[in-house]
Image: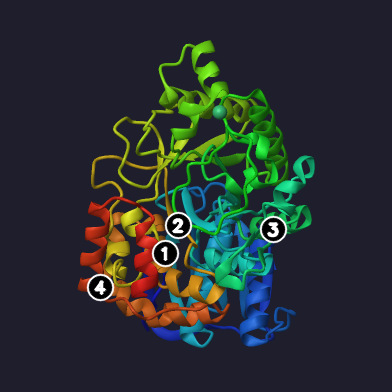
Amino acid sequence: MKFSVIPEPRTFQISGDAPVFFLNELCNLRADAASATAESDLLAFLEKVYELTPLIGSGKDYIFLSVDPTLPDREGYRLTVQEHKVTITGADDSGVFYGVQTLKQLLLQSDCALPALSIDDAPRFSHRAFMLDICRHFFAPDAIKLILDAMALHKLNVLHLHLSDDQGWRVEIYSRLLLAQIGGFRTDPAYGGKLYGGFLTKADVSDLVAYAAARHITIVPEIDLPGHSIAALAAYPALSCDGKERNVTSRVGIHRDILCAGKESTYEFVFSVLDEVCEMFPSGMVHIGGDEVPLHNWKQCPDCQKRIRDEHLADEKALYEAFMRRVADHLRAKGQRVFAWHNKELSPDFAGSIVLHHWNRPPETDAPYIDANWRVFYFDHSHGTLPLSAVYDYEPTAEGKTPVGLEACLWTEFIDNLGKAGAQTFPRLGAFCEGAWSEKEAKDYARFLEKLPAYERLLQTLPVPYTARRQANPRALKKLLLSLREGGNWVRGALQRKFD
Ligand SMILES: [Zn+2]
């Protein structure tokens, strides 16, 4: 018997073809207290997929779930199948949970009759993230839950939620209620010119945080600062340099209107918002954006120029760095780990203060970073411009640096529903997770392709939309290269629409 597990386990040995364990309604499940999340996840799977509420205790076959802290690797697990017995032992509760994710795949591929086998497994990277942009288009809590379910199957452990941008503010803040009430909606000609949008309430966030935790996923909230802030400026115009009234925009791209870094009231706003966000999302991690910040308005603004003089800063670029450092210092004093996008144009080195998500190239220093390489991990790219093989074959250490983790990103300028989101994300997320979880030596693209039918069947248990297309489109690739030469990162969005 041959099994296809994604991501590929570290070692997998099968002792023979004859089944020795049989799952049925008489099967027993025994879990220790530390394995409660794994137990409830397995029970939910069995009931949903097999309509089994087994484990009532009169049969011969057992599933044992337990934590053994003497196992060597954090998040690692051992899964063995012997005569009438499946044993999953995790180094910690997440290890047991990941063992259950593997067991699901084995059950689906064997009609619930397993041969003797042994798996020893642990992740390559401790930070295995998926970023969802719910600003360009709002994704409701149920859609986010489906994505969390899919992430769990892929053994991913961080959902990075992009919560604020020019096109929408997506989380309720009690101290600044207009952020969501005004910033959460735009008049969009593409959607009948009516108010279009939505936001997560505090109750939604609390529910999502618990839902994610039950799947060993941490949610990292992102409030994008000081750029990508038009939705915030629409709600509170005084936060901009000129104080003029603005509407939440439906235009994609980089906008000149950003937060004023001169006025002290901007910092009071940022701190109070982030304090509330950190309370809502107890991950101890927060992302403060920092990308695509045009300095035009700061050059004209008396408040920004005064701060540059008062703080003896060289220029607006230094003001950007001072702004980011001050916000990061505020958060770090509260015990937060701070993330931001690497800013290609302003390019400061925040080593020791902010962990940067490098989307364009690895850092030149030895600072810890997250690899979110746009060429291979931006899943909003069309399948013509980003073939599955490119996602799979990417090796994050190729340039001599080792990131602390990998992140796949779904920007949603041109993705307005879950069907499109799924079609862009799967099976790419399978390729991504094998890079994030499995050792470099365990990767094999030809074998990965052979595993896809079983992987698709696994996703159907949720179900999530899936696209089988994975061929590069030479014409689309040529257009993409031309557009990049012309500059303009967002041009890729237009290509997306044109070619997908
Ligand atoms: Zn200003």
Q: Secondary structure at mark 2?
A: strand
Q: How is the image coloured?
A: rainbow
Q: Nearer the viewer, mark 2 or mark 3?
A: 3
Instruction: Work out how far the residue at label 1 is from the one at label 3, CA to CA, in angstroms.
Output: 22 Å
Instruction: Work out how far the residue at label 4 is from the one at label 1, CA to CA, in angstroms.
Output: 15 Å
Q: Quadrant of ligand 1?
A: top right
Q: Are marks 2 and 3 in contact (CB under 8 Å)?
A: no
Q: Residue 472, which numbered label?
A: 4
Q: Is residue 41 left or right of residue 162?
A: right
Three-letter code for the amino acid on which mark 1 is drawn: Asp
| Residue 36 image point, x, y percent | 70, 61
Question: Is the C terminus in the top left, top right, bottom left or bottom right quadrant?
Answer: bottom left
Q: Secondary structure at mark 1?
A: loop
Q: Is residue 129 left or right of residue 483?
A: right
Question: According to the image, label 3 marks what residue?
Answer: 199
Three-letter code for the amino acid on which mark 2 is drawn: Cys
Q: In terms of sequence position, does the residue under pointer 1 or pointer 2 come before the other?
A: 1
Instruction: Work out how far the residue at label 1 is from the one at label 2, CA to CA, in angstroms.
Output: 8 Å
In this rendering, does residue 335 appear at all?
yes
Near mark 4 (Cα within 10 A), the count class, few <14, some 14-19 or many ≥20, is some
Q: Secondary structure at mark 3?
A: loop
